[in-house]
Image (cartoon, rainbow, N blue to C red):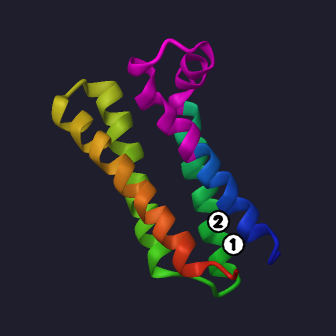
Amino acid sequence: MDQLLPVLGILTVLFIVLASINGLKRYTKLRFVKAIAKQHKLFGMLATTFAFIHLIVALSLGELRLTGALALVALLVTGVSGMLFSKLKKKNLYIVHRIAGPVAFILVIIHIILNSNI
């Protein structure tokens, strides 16, 4: 079970990075970037799902960290604002989504740095 926690964290980061590639699509004509960007919503949902599973495993091991909780909240704000923007097409939700994404990524990096066992 101890090995599961870092694997889930790595999967979460992987899918966050893949989802963030969506921001590059307007600056490139590379096919693989556009192909990855088309899966933006899927990658975002997978990142959030793996982050939740990561949280559940961390709780079961008594390893809850404030930095992880903050990163998860930021990831949820990113996801919820993105979903609501997709449905409602309100510009303020898009702005929240575009700001919350990088904030979530920074909080994830802080979580990794402060909790690494290296």
Which residue in the structure is indicated by mark 2? 54
Cα distance between the residues tagged 1 and 2: 5 Å
| Residue closest to the eye, 17 or 49 | 17
Residue 39 covered by magenta stretch: yes
The residue range painted magenta reads 16-41
118 versus 51 height, above or below: below
Locate residue 39: give its quadrant. top right
Amino acid type of disc 1?
Val
Magenta-highlighted stretch: main secondary structure? helix
Residue at the spot of label 1: 57
Disc 1 to disc 2: CB gap under 8 Å: yes
What residue is at 19 percent from the left and 28 percent from the top?
90
Q: Give the image quarter of residue 91.
A: top left
- The C terminus lies in quadrant: bottom right
The image position of residue 81, as x and y in percent, is: 32, 42
The residue drawn where x is 29% and y is 31% is: 85
Label 1 crowd bin: few (<14), some (14–19), many (20+), radius 10 Å: some
69 left or right of 6 in image: left
> Quick check: 77 left or right of 114?
left
| Amino acid at the residue labelled 2 | His
Residue ID at (80%, 78%): 2
Q: x and y percent of residue 99 in the render?
A: 28, 46
In terms of depth relative to the viewer, which is nearer, 31 or 2? 31
